[in-house]
Protein backbone atom coordinates (compact mmCIF):
# COMPACT_ATOMS: atom_id res chain seq x y z
CA UNK A 1 0.00 0.00 0.00
CA UNK A 2 2.82 2.39 0.89
CA UNK A 3 4.59 1.75 -2.42
CA UNK A 4 1.39 2.41 -4.40
CA UNK A 5 0.82 5.63 -2.48
CA UNK A 6 4.37 6.83 -3.20
CA UNK A 7 4.03 5.99 -6.88
CA UNK A 8 0.75 7.90 -7.15
CA UNK A 9 2.17 10.91 -5.30
CA UNK A 10 5.25 10.95 -7.54
CA UNK A 11 3.07 10.80 -10.67
CA UNK A 12 0.90 13.62 -9.33
CA UNK A 13 3.96 15.75 -8.56
CA UNK A 14 5.31 15.24 -12.10
CA UNK A 15 1.93 16.15 -13.55
CA UNK A 16 1.86 19.39 -11.59
CA UNK A 17 5.45 20.26 -12.51
CA UNK A 18 4.73 20.41 -16.25
CA UNK A 19 2.41 23.44 -16.08
CA UNK A 20 4.97 25.17 -13.87
CA UNK A 21 7.60 24.62 -16.57
CA UNK A 22 5.39 26.54 -19.00
CA UNK A 23 5.27 29.45 -16.56
CA UNK A 24 9.06 29.48 -16.50
CA UNK A 25 8.99 30.42 -20.21
CA UNK A 26 6.82 33.48 -19.45
CA UNK A 27 8.64 36.66 -20.47
CA UNK A 28 7.62 38.93 -17.61
CA UNK A 29 9.57 41.93 -18.94
CA UNK A 30 7.98 41.77 -22.40
CA UNK A 31 4.40 41.35 -21.20
CA UNK A 32 4.90 43.96 -18.47
CA UNK A 33 6.42 46.57 -20.80
CA UNK A 34 4.62 49.90 -21.08
CA UNK A 35 5.69 50.73 -24.66
CA UNK A 36 5.69 48.63 -27.85
CA UNK A 37 9.42 49.27 -28.30
CA UNK A 38 10.26 47.99 -24.82
CA UNK A 39 8.09 44.91 -25.31
CA UNK A 40 9.74 44.04 -28.61
CA UNK A 41 13.20 44.74 -27.19
CA UNK A 42 12.48 42.29 -24.35
CA UNK A 43 11.54 39.68 -26.96
CA UNK A 44 14.76 40.31 -28.89
CA UNK A 45 13.05 41.88 -31.91
CA UNK A 46 15.41 44.45 -33.42
CA UNK A 47 13.65 45.26 -36.68
CA UNK A 48 10.92 43.87 -38.90
CA UNK A 49 10.36 43.94 -42.64
CA UNK A 50 6.82 44.80 -43.78
CA UNK A 51 5.26 41.80 -45.54
CA UNK A 52 1.97 41.08 -47.28
CA UNK A 53 2.40 37.45 -46.19
CA UNK A 54 1.54 38.42 -42.61
CA UNK A 55 -2.24 38.79 -42.42
CA UNK A 56 -4.41 40.52 -39.82
CA UNK A 57 -8.17 39.98 -39.95
CA UNK A 58 -9.75 42.47 -37.55
CA UNK A 59 -12.74 44.81 -37.76
CA UNK A 60 -12.11 48.32 -39.03
CA UNK A 61 -14.47 49.63 -36.35
CA UNK A 62 -14.85 47.92 -32.98
CA UNK A 63 -18.07 49.03 -31.32
CA UNK A 64 -17.08 47.29 -28.10
CA UNK A 65 -13.42 47.76 -27.21
CA UNK A 66 -13.77 45.19 -24.42
CA UNK A 67 -13.91 42.35 -26.97
CA UNK A 68 -12.19 42.85 -30.31
CA UNK A 69 -11.86 39.63 -32.36
CA UNK A 70 -8.60 39.25 -34.27
CA UNK A 71 -7.30 36.50 -36.53
CA UNK A 72 -3.62 36.48 -37.44
CA UNK A 73 -1.69 34.24 -39.80
CA UNK A 74 1.54 34.04 -41.74
CA UNK A 75 2.38 32.63 -45.15
CA UNK A 76 6.09 33.32 -44.60
CA UNK A 77 7.84 29.93 -45.01
CA UNK A 78 9.19 28.54 -41.75
CA UNK A 79 7.19 30.80 -39.44
CA UNK A 80 7.92 29.80 -35.85
CA UNK A 81 6.12 32.58 -33.94
CA UNK A 82 3.39 35.20 -34.24
CA UNK A 83 3.52 38.27 -31.97
CA UNK A 84 0.54 40.62 -31.52
CA UNK A 85 1.18 44.19 -30.33
CA UNK A 86 -1.54 46.78 -29.71
CA UNK A 87 0.25 50.09 -29.92
CA UNK A 88 -1.81 52.27 -27.53
CA UNK A 89 -2.74 49.69 -24.89
CA UNK A 90 -1.29 50.17 -21.38
CA UNK A 91 0.53 46.84 -21.87
CA UNK A 92 1.07 46.68 -25.67
CA UNK A 93 2.19 43.04 -25.98
CA UNK A 94 -1.11 41.17 -26.33
CA UNK A 95 0.23 37.71 -27.19
CA UNK A 96 3.00 35.56 -28.55
CA UNK A 97 2.26 32.23 -30.19
CA UNK A 98 5.08 29.76 -30.85
CA UNK A 99 4.72 27.06 -33.54
CA UNK A 100 6.62 23.86 -34.13
CA UNK A 101 7.72 22.63 -37.56
CA UNK A 102 4.74 21.80 -39.74
CA UNK A 103 2.21 23.72 -37.65
CA UNK A 104 -0.08 26.20 -39.35
CA UNK A 105 0.93 29.71 -38.14
CA UNK A 106 -2.60 30.90 -37.37
CA UNK A 107 -4.24 32.19 -34.21
CA UNK A 108 -7.61 33.65 -33.28
CA UNK A 109 -7.94 35.78 -30.17
CA UNK A 110 -10.09 38.41 -28.50
CA UNK A 111 -8.30 41.48 -27.19
CA UNK A 112 -9.30 44.52 -25.20
CA UNK A 113 -8.62 47.93 -26.70
CA UNK A 114 -9.15 51.12 -24.73
CA UNK A 115 -8.91 53.43 -27.76
CA UNK A 116 -8.33 53.54 -31.50
CA UNK A 117 -4.95 52.00 -32.18
CA UNK A 118 -2.76 50.15 -34.64
CA UNK A 119 -2.49 46.41 -34.25
CA UNK A 120 0.90 45.15 -35.33
CA UNK A 121 1.62 41.49 -35.97
CA UNK A 122 5.13 40.15 -36.34
CA UNK A 123 6.02 36.76 -37.77
CA UNK A 124 9.35 35.19 -36.86
CA UNK A 125 10.95 32.97 -39.50
CA UNK A 126 14.58 31.86 -39.76
CA UNK A 127 15.65 34.45 -37.19
CA UNK A 128 14.10 37.35 -39.12
CA UNK A 129 10.91 39.27 -38.41
CA UNK A 130 8.15 40.26 -40.83
CA UNK A 131 5.30 42.59 -39.93
CA UNK A 132 1.86 43.87 -40.85
CA UNK A 133 -0.17 46.68 -39.28
CA UNK A 134 -3.88 47.46 -39.23
CA UNK A 135 -5.72 50.30 -37.54
CA UNK A 136 -8.83 49.44 -35.54
CA UNK A 137 -11.11 52.30 -34.57
CA UNK A 138 -12.77 51.91 -31.18
CA UNK A 139 -16.04 53.78 -30.75
CA UNK A 140 -17.14 55.26 -27.43
CA UNK A 141 -20.27 53.77 -25.95
CA UNK A 142 -20.63 51.20 -28.72
CA UNK A 143 -22.89 53.43 -30.83
CA UNK A 144 -20.90 52.98 -34.02
CA UNK A 145 -20.16 56.67 -34.51
Image (spheres, helix red, strand yellow):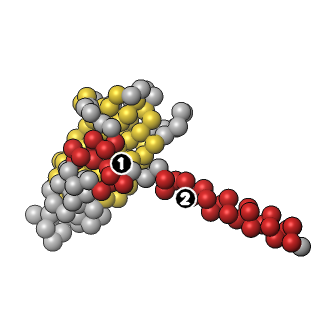
| Label 2 neighbour load within 10 Å: few <14, some 14-19, many 20+ | few
Q: Residue under circle 1?
A: 71
Label 1 or label 2, whichever comes before in sequence order = 2
Q: In which quarter of the image is residue 126?
A: top left
Name the residue located 26 percent from the left edge and 37 percent from the top edge.
Answer: 132
* Quadrant (top left/top right/bottom left/bottom right) for the C terminus: bottom left
Q: In this view, does 57 lie to the left or right of 13?
A: left
| Label 1 neighbour load within 10 Å: few <14, some 14-19, many 20+ | few
Q: Residue under circle 2?
A: 20
User: Of helix, strand and loop, which one carries label 1?
Assistant: strand
Specify the farthest residue to the right.
1
Q: Which of 145 and 106 is in front in this view?
A: 106
Q: Distance between the residues labelled 1 and 2?
A: 28 Å
User: Of helix, strand and loop, which one carries label 2?
Assistant: helix
Residue 51 visible, this orientation: yes
Q: Quadrant of residue 72?
A: top left
**Residue 84 placed where, x, y %?**
31, 47
Name the residue located 25 percent from the left edge and 28 percent from the top edge.
Answer: 49
Q: Residue 128 carries which label?
A: none
When the figure is inspected, residue 120 is found, relative to residue 144, above or below; the finding is above
**Residue 55 placed where, x, y %?**
32, 38
**Residue 27 placed where, x, y %?**
39, 50
**Residue 111 placed where, x, y %?**
31, 59
Name the residue located 34 percent from the left edge and 42 percent from the top edge.
Answer: 43
Name the residue located 22 percent from the left edge and 55 percent from the top edge.
Answer: 34
Q: In this view, does 53 lie to the left or right of 98?
A: left
Labels 1, 2: front one: 2
Q: In this view, does 5 lie to the left or right of 121?
A: right
Specify the farthest residue to the left.
145
Residue 60 visible, this orientation: no
* Quadrant (top left/top right/bottom left/bottom right) for the N terminus: bottom right
Q: Is residue 8 left or right of residue 51?
A: right
Amino acid sequence: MNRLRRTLLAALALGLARPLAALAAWNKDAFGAKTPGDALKSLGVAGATPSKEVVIDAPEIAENGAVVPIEVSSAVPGTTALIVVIEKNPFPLASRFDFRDGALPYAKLNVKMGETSDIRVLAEAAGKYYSATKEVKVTIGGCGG
